Image (cartoon, rainbow, N blue to C red):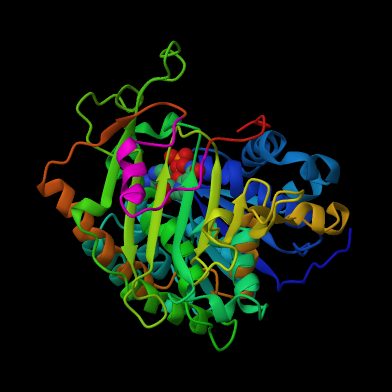
Amino acid sequence: MVSRVIPVDLFDLVIFGGTGDLARRKILPGLYRRFCAGQMPPQARVIGAARSELDSEGYRTLVREAIEEFGGEEAKACDSLDAFLAQLEYVTIDARGEGGWKELQSLMSGTDHIEAYYFSVAPSLFGDIAERLQKWGMADERARIVVEKPFGRDLETARALNKTLATYFNEDQIYRIDHYLGKETVQNLMAVRFGNMLFEPLWNSQYVDHIQITVAETVGVGGRGEYYDKSGAMRDMVQNHLMQLLCLIAMEPPARFDPDAVRDEKLKVIRALDPVPAYHIVRGQYQAEACNEADNPGYRTAVDNPRSRTESFIALRTQISNWRWAGTPFYLRTGKRLADRASEITVVFKDTPHSIFGEDAGRHRNVLSIRLQPNEGITLGVTIKEPGPGGMRLIDVPLDMSFADALKEDDVEHVDAYERLIMDVIRGNQTLFMRGDEVEAAWAWTDPIIQGWEARNDVPKPYDHGSEGPTDAVELLRREGRAWRSLTPKTPKRGA
Ligand code: NAD
């Protein structure tokens, strides 16, 4: 493997919530993989800070188990776990009280390391932690804070949170994570759009009929039922992940690949989004799996709320009111317990203005599909002549590029979204993090949509386990003469 590891400066990373699910499943295994890649200097430290009464030795045991369970093949192959664990410390801390803060302060003093504080705790604790970091002298100019989603649950709460954090930190010290932005293929969206001459001249309402963004999951709410039922697909997925994909696919070319240039362009897209009327929204709730209700219960059973009106699926149609995109529909859909797991952006180009082959040859459209997961890659549907005798009949064939096939696997270093983003925090690069005004603009667009269905007492439509969502979602496109890309796998599934 070609190593492209860029060294980082010495750092101390404090993980508030260092014993929690996210820390154990993503943050710590990710850090270990960076350690194995040679990116964590020997004097750098990771300090877990959480409520559990543990000492550093006990924490190392917890982290060892987490990495063994969630570290994946690369972590297993690396065989340096003891050395990594030696760079870990732990402080029992009370985010709402004073316990543990003096210990943390003394651990953090006496070095000139970069200080990163990862708030991997419930958002209700963000303000308490920020306040205490300042009180104990840790909110100096070397400090960066990383805050997890959800960033607010509406515009008002997001604004309040931004205001609280701004009391203690400057915007260039605040890293709001949307882990979608750390995915290799999401960044590839920018490379495809702005690294090729081919697409840009066609990337507008004159040539594009419509764009679809799909993030489909086969899993249900699992153990997150209580949280999810208060959130729903709109808040959990659309306001952040799908919105980010929409920005990257629709934004103007930034002048430079630098944080503010990129985020300025994304913000313009969000601000240009049209409001979404009720007839352009379909919400759904999954039903139990037929004949297997015990293993795969319906949404309301899964969240233990028989009257729940929270959506586990949403499809909507929006438009961007600017010169590039006026009149081009953007269809967004996301949901749980759908036919397949897929994150995909589909750009459907317009018909040719005139068919020289006559109507019998059929009319075909170029479709560019960008698959983010699984099987990352790009497919361009190209129209050709159907082989064989019998005149000129047209068919579509895919120009298919799987990234895994195109880039020899051995040459590619796989970096998980979290580990990439944590290293960006250490480097001080905010390009892949959301700015405060961006988050607020996203909520300003989302709020009236949610308020609308709350005022209407809208009940989500049921949809079958393993389906494409409610039939109304299919209708949303069909009535405009369009169709969603099918989620139903054409080849036998290799596992969801
Ligand atoms: P969790 O409940 O598993 O862990 C919470 C952590 O916070 C624990 O370490 C606990 O000790 C600590 N904590 C709780 N109260 C505390 C207090 N008063 N003082 C000090 N520490 C305290 O939660 P999680 O799933 O790890 O999620 C953490 C954050 O990450 C949340 O904001 C969540 O929304 C976000 N998030 C989680 C996931 C995920 O997959 N788990 C995904 C995206 C975002």
* Residue 150 appears in the rendering: no
Residue at position x 83%, y 46% from top? 80
Residue at position x 53%, y 79% from top? 259
* Residue 273 appears in the rendering: yes
Front residue of 91/474: it is 474
Magenta span of residues: 467-487
- Left or right position of 140 against 34: left
Residue at position x 51%, y 71% from top? 354
Magenta region includes residue 217:
no
Quadrant of the displayed image that contains ligand 1: top left
Q: Height in image: 307 above or below 460?
A: above
Q: Residue furthest bottom?
A: 255
Q: Residue furthest front?
A: 390
- Left or right position of 225 against 25: left
- Left or right position of 296 against 392: left
Q: Magenta part mainly helix, strand or loop?
A: loop
User: Which quadrant of the rendered structure holds the C terminus?
Assistant: top right
How many numbered badges does the structure rendering display? 0
Q: Height in image: 111 above or below 404?
A: below
Magenta region includes residue 469:
yes
Which x, y percent locates residue 214? 47, 50
**Residue 101 occupies quadrant:** bottom left
Which x, y percent locates residue 72? 73, 40
Which x, y percent locates residue 400? 72, 55
Residue at position x 72%, y 54% from top? 87
Front residue of 307/401: it is 401
**Residue 313 occupies quadrant:** top left
Q: Height in image: 487 above or below 160?
A: above
Which x, y percent locates residue 64? 70, 38
Front residue of 179/52: it is 179
User: Which quadrant of the rendered structure holds the N terminus?
Assistant: bottom right
